[in-house]
Image (tube, rainbow, N blue to C red):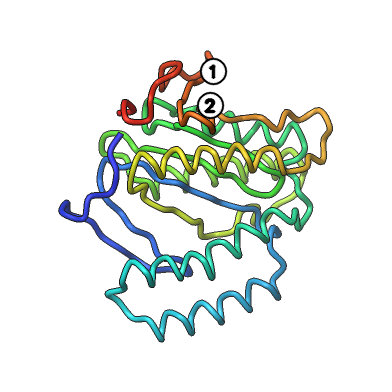
Amino acid sequence: MNFFDKKVEHGVYYGNLPHWRQSTVCYFVTFRTIDSIPQVKLNQWLSERDQWLREHPQPRTNEQSAEYHRLFTRKIEHWLDQNYGECLLGIKQFKQIVIDALMYFHEDRYRIWEYTVAVNHVHLLIEPLGDHELNDIISSIKSYTANAINKARGVSGHFWQKEYFDHILRSKEQFIGIVKYIRKHDGKVANVDANVDATSCRVKVDAASSRMSVDATSCRVKENTRLEDVS
């Protein structure tokens, strides 16, 4: 597994969110359903975010980047955890469509180190393989699952929010932290369908020892591997 290296060629582009790109790295990605955040809240967020960006032009310091995530990224995460919208991914059939799509090209076009499907959004740790680009991977997953879920519901139209959040991992410590975040998130999210298993993590982390193991379905990290031994 590779992490962001400022000495290696990389790029940044902007939509509603900043997107950093570098080859052969691992990303933390979140994409959400179209109704997962009320429009009035999203409009307020965009207005405040745009003003902050105007007042803090590139290049930004590490402290400014941390401030951005504290003010804006974490606010989105908080709103997602409020379970706004229809929460259709809490229905077992629709959740399984997303899980099957995530795993379809696992170890072919990309490697999924961790994921969870919440009732109105998806978190995953993903590493594109070969020449495959993150944008193409996520667009393909979202397109297929939107069409499949809409077909099952007998409706048409947008299912996912157009843009998604992504962050290049900077270190093994951050990798462990995000795995723990996803596991904690799994424990907090309510399910619409009581038969949906909320535990979908691939990598298991012992919070006390920072050791990792995985279940039998995804042998990415050997049992009791130390953090410093992850590669």
Foreground of the two, 49 or 11: 49
User: In the rendered structure, which amino acid carries the disc numbered 1?
Assistant: Asp
Indicate the position of residue 183 as horizontal and vertical percent values.
60, 36
- Mark 1 is surrounded, within 10 Å at the Cα level, by few (under 14), some (14 to 19) or many (20 or more) other residues, namely some
| Circle 2 SS class | strand
Task: Report the quarter where the C terminus lies.
Answer: top left
> Is the residue 14 above or below the residue 142 in the image?
below
The residue positioned 15% from the left and 54% from the top of the image is: 7
For marks 2 and 1 on the same chain, the one whose residue lies earlier in the sequence: 2
Question: Given the image, on which type of amino acid does mark 2 rest?
Answer: Lys
- Residue name at image x 63 percent, y 48 percent: 121
Q: Is residue 57 depicted above or below 209 in this figure? A: below
Question: Badge 2 is on which residue?
Answer: 204
> For this rendering, which residue is in front, 221 or 32?
221
| Residue most extreme to the top | 216
Q: Quadrant of residue 109?
A: top left
- Quick check: marks 2 and 1 in contact, CB under 8 Å? yes
Tally the numbered discs: 2
Toward the viewer: 105 or 111?
A: 111
7 to the left or right of 136? left
* Residue 215 image label: 1
2 vs 1, front mark: 2
- 85 is higher (above) or lower (below) than 87: below
Query: Secondary structure beneath disc 1?
Result: loop
Give the left or right position of residue 65, taking residue 162 as reference.
left
Residue 224 at x, y = what percent? 44, 18
Alpha carbons under labels 2 and 1: distance apart = 8 Å
- The image quarter containing residue 185 is top right
Q: Position of residue 155 (x, y in %)?
A: 75, 49
Q: Where does the image place residue 225, in percent across and percent down from the top left? A: 40, 21
Asked if residue 47 lies left or right of residue 129, the reply is: right
